[in-house]
């Protein structure tokens, strides 16, 4: 629960198990497994497979993703934010943070678009890498035994997917100042004191 948490020290201890240990720690520490019908065995398999899909590229490694998981939980647990975030959102954000750079090829969107990369063509030059990270992660869940949402209700699944897609797409730095301006506007009107669903997702 510290902003100064040393993710590199944890990784030295855990190595290929870092992501799954970190995710499972937060799921249990925040009692998400008691509040949600999470298929725990599937979650362990999914996160283990997810970590193995991160490549050895500059910065965007599984260690970075683990750092983002820890940082995300840190922010969600702050006193002004925690009351507005339920268990489903917390679970979505933990998994979304773990997924957010999955399979990163070590190039940025501008390069992919200019080079007419296959990903840029597939995602029509719009948030190319972010779209790829979501879809490549979600494809793992399509394999039997890897879907942590297997026993979620249809409503829960749609909610968690929408949250995860929106927040991972939100990591596209092209839209950073647009998101920040919207956030500041909503904050100046005290919208986050009693947020509706749209404001909660903006907060996330």
Image (cartoon, grey):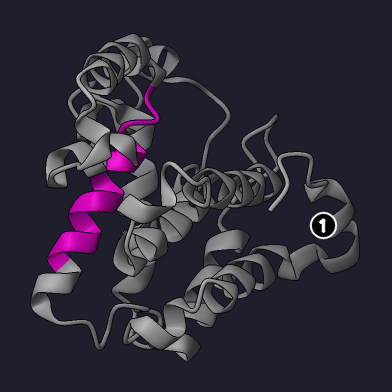
State yes or no: residue 187 in magenta.
Answer: no
Q: Classify 105 as above or below 1.
A: above
State yes or no: residue 168 in magenta.
Answer: yes
Can you see residue 42? Answer: no
Question: Could you say where residue 86 lies in the image, as x and y percent from the top left?
Answer: 32, 63
Q: Quadrant of the C terminus?
A: top left
Mark 1 Cα-neighbour bin, 10 Å: few <14, some 14–19, many ≥20? some
Q: In the rendered image, which residue does mark 1 sit on?
A: 11
Q: Classify 38 as above or below 61.
A: below
Give the residue displayed 35% in from the left and 25% down from the top: 117
What's the magenta region?
Answer: 158-172
Give the residue displayed 68% in from the left and 72% down from the top: 21
Counting the numbered discs, the total is 1
Question: Could you say where residue 98 lies in the image, as x and y percent from the top left?
Answer: 52, 54
Snapshot quadrant of residue 173: top left
78 or 170, which is in the foreground? 78
Element under label 1? helix
Snapshot quadrant of residue 52: bottom right
Q: Classify 113 as above or below 76.
A: above
72 or 99, which is in the foreground? 72
Question: Could you say where residue 113 lies in the image, as x and y percent from the top left?
Answer: 33, 15
């Amino acid at each position: 629960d510290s902003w100064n948490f040393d993710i590199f020290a944890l990784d030295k201890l855990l190595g290929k198990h870092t992501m799954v240990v970190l995710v499972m720690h937060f799921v249990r520490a925040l009692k998400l497994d008691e509040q949600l019908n999470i298929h725990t065995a599937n979650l362990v398999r999914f996160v283990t497979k997810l970590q193995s899909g991160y490549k050895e590229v500059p910065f965007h490694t599984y260690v970075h993703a683990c750092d983002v998981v820890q940082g995300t939980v840190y922010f969600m647990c702050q006193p002004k934010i925690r009351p507005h975030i339920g268990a489903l959102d917390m679970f979505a954000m933990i998994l979304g943070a773990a997924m957010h750079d999955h399979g990163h090829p070590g190039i940025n969107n501008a390069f992919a678009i200019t080079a007419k990369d296959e990903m840029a063509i597939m995602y029509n030059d719009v948030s190319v890498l972010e779209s790829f990270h979501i879809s490549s992660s979600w494809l793992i869940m399509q394999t039997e035994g890897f879907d942590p949402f297997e026993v979620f209700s249809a409503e829960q699944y749609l909610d968690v997917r929408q949250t995860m897609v929106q927040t991972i797409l939100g990591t596209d730095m092209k839209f950073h100042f647009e998101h920040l301006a919207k956030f500041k506007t909503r904050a100046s009107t005290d919208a986050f004191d009693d947020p509706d669903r749209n404001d909660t997702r903006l907060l996330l």
